[in-house]
């Protein structure tokens, strides 16, 4: 009973929040939009160097957003490996010697790597791109970890930090170079746009996969519910 | 009332459900899930509202794609922090400083990291 009473203010807050949100959505929906963004984008698509509108927005028209996003990812990854408890990330408790998983891996890993490459390549003219490819790559990395394949580059050392910041660094380099050449920050020259976007997407894929993988392996893996004996495990 | 607008209202409802869970539930992982639910609601509102009049709009879609990736990274970092907190204190919820209901158990001895 007491708990039910305690839920009342929370319920009231949530209902007020939802009704306010719904009212705003309705108000926005019945007003005419002043700018026709899709039409504007369709007119400028041939200047962007890619044929897929979402990729064009992400890596050309609104690439500042993507640059800051990969910055956020790198910070999250570095923070994740900073609180990692093991010095090696090779905790034996994380190893499984599951025969089935191992057999499945030999089929799945090449396929997943192929799929990641395809998604990266498809991003220029159909749905796909660096983020989807990076997610698939990270998933295959997680699978490899679970199967106990040693992955030395994931040790929190100079290599891992370099890999994490590679995408961000290349992206920033392109941005600064285009600014120094008299253009605006992140405005690619139209004849080089396609090449630059492909290069940036490739390094972004690697960096995103590495960030997600680093965050996966950096979680402490032992169970704190069982008191350890002898202080080693 | 187009289907896209319905998505936007569904997103608003998801936001409300997530907010409720975020306020009421004390377990940290569930709090995180509720917070993610709120985020998904925001994404739905963005995409649904934008394509309500003139078909799919690539600009909000690209921004939502960015948002999803950031949300995944932030969630993963939060899970790492929560697991670390659980490992150090053995609790799944943040302590209420006002009242100490649990008999106070000192912080557990952290296991030594294996040296190589």
Image (cartoon, helix red, strand yellow):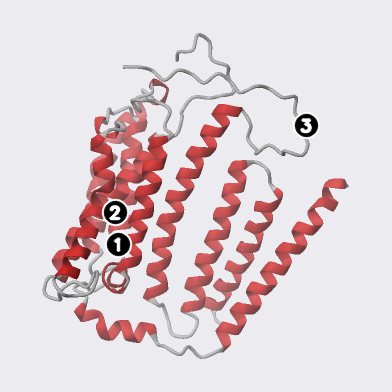
Instruction: Provide residue A160's location: percent of width, then percent of height.
Output: 27, 38
Front label number (3 vs 1)? 3
Which residue reaches farthest top?
A: A230
Q: Residue at x 59, y 23 (%)?
A: A225
Percent x, y of residue A47:
20, 79
Question: Is B72 drawn above or below residue B64 in the view shown?
Answer: above
Where B41 falls versus A82 (above or below)? below
Label 1 close to label 2 by CB (< 8 Å): yes
Counting from the top left corner in percent of width and height, residue B9 is at: 60, 72
Drawn side of residue A208 relative to residue B49, left or right: left
Badge 3 crowding class, 10 Å Cα cut-off, few under 14, some 14 to 19, many 20 or more, is few
Quadrant in the picture for the C terminus of chain A: top left
Judging depth in this view, the residue of A93 and A214 nearest the camera is A214
Q: Disc 2: which chain?
A: A
Residue assigned mark 1? A128
Callout 3: residue from which chain?
Answer: B
In the picture provided, is A172 more to the left or to the right than A225?
Answer: left
């Amino acid at each position: 009973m007491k708990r039910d009473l305690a839920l009342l203010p929370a319920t009231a807050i949530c209902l007020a929040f939802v009704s306010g949100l719904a009212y705003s959505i309705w108000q926005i929906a019945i007003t005419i939009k002043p700018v026709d963004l899709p039409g504007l984008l369709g007119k400028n698509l041939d200047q962007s160097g890619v044929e897929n509108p979402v990729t064009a927005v992400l890596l050309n028209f609104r690439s500042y957003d993507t640059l800051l996003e990969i910055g956020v990812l790198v910070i999250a990854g570095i923070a994740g490996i900073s609180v990692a408890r093991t010095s090696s990330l090779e905790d034996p408790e994380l190893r499984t010697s599951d025969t089935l998983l191992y057999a499945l891996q030999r089929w799945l890993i090449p396929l997943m790597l192929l799929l990641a490459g395809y998604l990266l390549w498809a991003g220029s003219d159909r749905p796909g791109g660096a983020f989807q490819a990076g997610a698939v790559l990270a998933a295959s990395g997680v699978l490899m970890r679970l199967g106990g394949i040693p992955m030395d580059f994931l040790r929190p050392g100079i290599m891992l930090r370099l890999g994490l910041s590679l995408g961000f660094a290349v992206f920033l380099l392109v941005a600064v170079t285009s600014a120094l050449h008299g253009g605006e920050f992140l405005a690619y020259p139209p004849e080089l746009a396609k090449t630059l976007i492909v290069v940036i997407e490739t390094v972004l894929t690697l960096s995103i996969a590495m960030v997600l993988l680093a965050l996966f392996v950096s979680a402490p893996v032992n169970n704190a519910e069982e008191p350890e004996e002898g202080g080693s495990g | 009332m187009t289907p896209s607008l319905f998505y936007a209202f569904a997103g608003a409802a998801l936001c409300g459900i997530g907010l409720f869970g975020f306020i009421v539930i004390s377990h940290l992982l569930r709090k995180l899930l509720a917070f993610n639910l709120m985020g998904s609601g925001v994404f739905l509102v963005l995409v649904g509202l934008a394509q309500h009049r003139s078909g799919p709009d690539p600009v909000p879609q690209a921004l939502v794609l960015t948002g999803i990736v950031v949300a995944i990274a932030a969630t993963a970092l939060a899970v790492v922090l929560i697991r670390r907190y659980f490992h150090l204190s053995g609790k799944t919820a943040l302590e209420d400083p006002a009242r100490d209901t649990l008999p106070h158990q000192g912080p557990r001895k952290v296991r030594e990291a294996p040296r190589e």
